[in-house]
């Protein structure tokens, strides 16, 4: 990339980070400026960088990867100081989004030096970050939390006996489907589900987890229409190729950021490198979907769930 074009891209990135309402919807336009990310190998490296910075939101990990592809470990100046390091004078900051304020400034380890008279805490922090097994099975408590949160996201869950090869089936809920029970005003309120999810009995936890993540990606990438109340009907018309690519990208990112083994890794390796150019997926939408799924991996309340946020008739009762 030429120096002039790089400066233009960085200015666009800065303006993107400062925008509140439209900031996320500029990601795809920004990526379109940089032709190199249309090539499979470079795009795969970009996904790997988003997965690497798992302590940051997917959108911030993307911003870090775009601004500083060589970044290894990034923190705010205050957090570097807590590790016994200071930011070098003149170091160029990495701009990221901060909740409830425009931006925050991050610096890579290469931008810092050890404070005089202080022990360097970086190596211990790096070892701690790298300690997890990148190909481990999903922790049982993580899968359990995800399953517990399904109703809060408007999803009814049931199992079907061992037999079919599919581990998960997802469909839009109908009038005859059993209601989900949501905790509201100190009571449980029966509500019509938006989607119905079936998982196969006896399937390994990691297989079930990966399949559920792909099913959720269909919802949060807006591939599956629901539309029984305003806010749920937002669906996108994309080709089967784009749909499959987005689902596998979401699944791979969620699993890699969680450091869980995933069949999506082989999809990235086998399918990405077979293509001369990446299909026109929305990385904006992919990051949004990963963010929403990662919310479901933490204990949540009904106020945090997708159901309440997208169901006006229920929201008026809280």
Image (cartoon, rainbow, N blue to C red):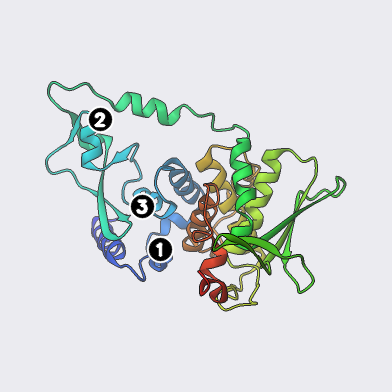
Residue 4 image offset from top left, x and y in percent = 23, 60
Q: In the rendered view, does 29 fall on the left or right side of 296?
A: left
**Residue at (66% x, 51% y) in the render:** 212
Q: Position of residue 42 (x, y in %)?
A: 46, 49
Percent across and percent down for residue 2 are 28, 56
Residue lying furthest right: 163
Is mark 1 in CB contact (under 8 Å) with mark 3? no
CA gap between label 1 and label 3 equals 10 Å
Count of residue discs: 3
In the image: residue 176, left or right of residue 238: right
Q: Earlier in the sequence, mark 2 or mark 3?
A: 3
Depth order, front residue of 208/154: 154
- First-in-chain label (1 vs 3): 1
Q: Which residue is mark 2?
A: 83
Asked whether 166 or 249 is in front, the reply is 166
Residue toward you, 149 or 16: 149
Dot 1: what SS?
Answer: helix
- Residue 35 falls in image quadrant: bottom left
Q: Between disc 2 and disc 1, whose residue precedes?
A: 1
Q: Which residue is mark 1?
A: 27
According to the picture, the residue beneath numbered tag 3 turns out to be: 66
Callout 1 environment at 10 Å: few (<14), some (14 to 19), or many (20+)?
A: many
Residue sitting at 59 percent across and 32 percent down? 135
Judge left or right: residue 210 versus residue 186.
Answer: right
Residue drawn at x 88%, y 47% as measured from the top left:
163
Which is in the foreground here, disc 2 or disc 3? Answer: 2
CB under 8 Å between callouts 2 and 1? no
What quarter of the picture does the N terminus occupy? Answer: bottom left
């Amino acid at each position: 990339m030429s120096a002039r074009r790089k400066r233009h891209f960085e200015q666009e990135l800065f303006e993107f980070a400062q925008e509140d309402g439209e900031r996320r919807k500029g990601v795809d336009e920004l990526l379109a400026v940089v032709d190199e990310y249309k090539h499979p190998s470079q795009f795969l490296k970009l996904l790997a960088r988003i997965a690497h910075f798992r302590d940051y939101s997917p959108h911030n990990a993307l911003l870090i990867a775009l601004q500083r592809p060589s970044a290894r470990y990034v923190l705010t100046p205050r957090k570097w100081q807590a590790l016994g390091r200071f930011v070098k004078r003149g170091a160029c900051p990495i701009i990221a989004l901060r909740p409830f304020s425009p931006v925050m400034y991050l610096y890579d380890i290469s931008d810092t030096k050890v404070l005089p008279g202080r022990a360097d805490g970086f190596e211990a922090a790096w070892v701690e970050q790298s300690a997890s097994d990148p190909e481990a099975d999903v922790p049982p408590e993580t899968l359990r939390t995800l399953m517990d949160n399904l109703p809060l996201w408007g999803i009814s869950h049931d199992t079907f006996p061992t037999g079919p090869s599919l581990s998960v089936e997802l469909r839009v809920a109908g009038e005859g489907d059993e209601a989900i029970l949501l905790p509201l005003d100190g009571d449980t309120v029966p509500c019509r589900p938006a989607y119905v999810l079936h998982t196969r009995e006896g399937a390994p936890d990691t297989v079930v987890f990966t399949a559920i993540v792909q099913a959720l990606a269909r919802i949060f990438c807006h591939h599956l229409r629901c539309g029984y109340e305003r806010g749920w009907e937002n669906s996108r018309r994309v080709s089967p190729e784009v749909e499959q690519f987005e689902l596998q990208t979401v699944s791979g990112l969620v699993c890699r950021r969680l450091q869980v083994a995933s069949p999506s890794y082989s999809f990235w390796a086998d399918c990405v490198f077979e293509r001369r150019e990446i299909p026109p997926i929305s990385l904006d939408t992919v990051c949004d979907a990963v963010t929403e799924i990662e919310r479901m991996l933490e204990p949540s309340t009904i106020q945090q769930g997708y159901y309440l946020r997208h169901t006006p008739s229920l929201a008026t009762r809280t």
